Amino acid sequence: MELAAAKLKFIEAWGKLGSEWGINRTMAQVHALLLISPEALTTEEIMEQLSISRGNANMTLRDLIGWGLIEKQHKAGERKEYFFADKDVWNIARQVAKERKKRELEPVLKILNELSTVNGDEKDPEFITFKKSIKDINKLAGNVDKTLETMLKAEESWFWGSVLKVFK
Amino acid sequence: MELAAAKLKFIEAWGKLGSEWGINRTMAQVHALLLISPEALTTEEIMEQLSISRGNANMTLRDLIGWGLIEKQHKAGERKEYFFADKDVWNIARQVAKERKKRELEPVLKILNELSTVNGDEKDPEFITFKKSIKDINKLAGNVDKTLETMLKAEESWFWGSVLKVFK
DNA sequence: ATAAAGTTTCAATAATTTTTGAAAGTTTAA
DNA sequence: TTAAACTTTCAAAAATTATTGAAACTTTAT
């Protein structure tokens, strides 16, 4: 396969993966484009390469900055803003994990904790089942939370070394 | 908080979490409802409790069966079909991990492997950057895949015991 | 101060995803 | 075989989400 075709295929695949995981397709595609680009790119270049509007490009770039996945760069003597992506895949994974933990896991944990204080008739099967489900989910969510916490702090080699060693 | 209110809140929270992770809201809500229900429920009961149409309920129930999260039950002497959810949260997590691995991770791994055979000029920065990104993503995806594979086979206590022990 | 270069905003529009509901299909019992 | 009970399908409608593009805004250089 040629480079040009491979790039397109990668951008498409990354976009699809993103959309299956609740990240909007364009955002994932812009990220893909910057990830495989050795140089920082301008809004114009991104608009052109992905055939998207200025407004869309601008909002998407701001979102990506908000996720900590790309940064602005200013070139000496130029007005234009350039954008580039962190190329370290482990950093990317951590950044995504961090944001989703904050935005999605934590609010749910909060609600689960509230729900575990529910009170009712200890003889009622409805009540018993409810309490048990909440308790079990809480426990699992707590484990996931702890593991993510560790992952956020870890060096890649240490993290996978430790995790995979256990599994051999 | 009272049981009735807590149930509603749980169904809502589970639905929201689902939709943030690419699982349709109704599907997550039906799952939530069955998860906290001590008895198997009929399509009618589900329709009524969640205020959804028959068509929606039917499709959603079939999807949930396809995901291995709920099962049909037939009560002796009755025509109606009843549905109940596996209450074991670890089984649920594994089931979801298994399906998403199959539906989403595996197709991406396949494409990444194709892309890693790209050929071009070893002096071209575009080519160098592309190859390195693909290689790094491939490595990470491989680690994720291995970990999921282990999780799918593992007992809950063994899995978290091993993972969390490493992190203390 | 002003105009060129560049960036941001957001209401309108388009695209996608989900839901409905009625018709078609199936199963069971008499 | 018939009809009641129940399930499935799917085209149309509704709801949600993403995108456009033009106007407003900001910054810089002269």
Image (cartoon, coloured by chain):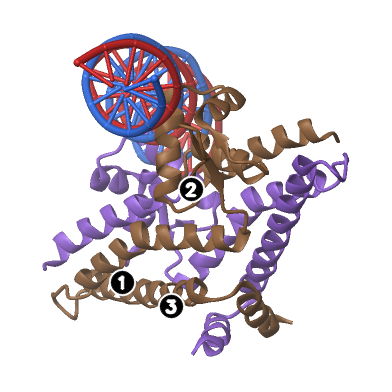
Chain colours: A brown, B purple, C red, D blue
> Residue A104's x, y, as percent?
35, 58
- Whether residue B37 is visible: no
Q: Could you say which is closer to the camera, residue A26 or residue A124?
A: A26
Element at label 2: strand
In the picture provided, is A157 more to the left or to the right than A118? right
Disc 3 and disc 2 on one polypeptide chain: yes
**Picture quarter containing residue A161?**
bottom right
Element at label 3: helix
- Disc 3 is attached to a residue of which chain? A
How packed mark 3 is, by other alpha carbons closer than 10 Å (few <14, some 14-19, many 20 or more), is some
Q: Which residue lies under the disc numbered 1?
A: A134
Q: Name the residue under label 2.
A: A71
Q: Which residue is drawn at the image coordinates 68% and 67% (left, top)?
A: B143
Badge 1 crowding class, 10 Å Cα cut-off, few under 14, some 14 to 19, many 20 or more, is: many
- Between label 1 and label 2, give the one nearer the viewer: 2
Q: Please rate how many residues cluster around mark 2, counting C-alpha atoms within 10 Å: few if below 14, some from 14 to 19, many from 20.
A: some
Picture coordinates of residue B133, whole percent (x, y): 70, 51
- Label 1 SS: helix
- Look at 78% across and 47% down and name the residue there: B128
Indicate the position of residue A145 as horizontal and vertical percent values: 41, 73
Q: Tag 2: residue type? A: Glu
Say which mark, if any, is on residue A146: 3
**Which residue is nearer to you in this view: A135 or D24?**
D24
Q: In this view, does A46 lie to the left or right of A23?
A: right
Q: Dot 1 falls on which chain?
A: A
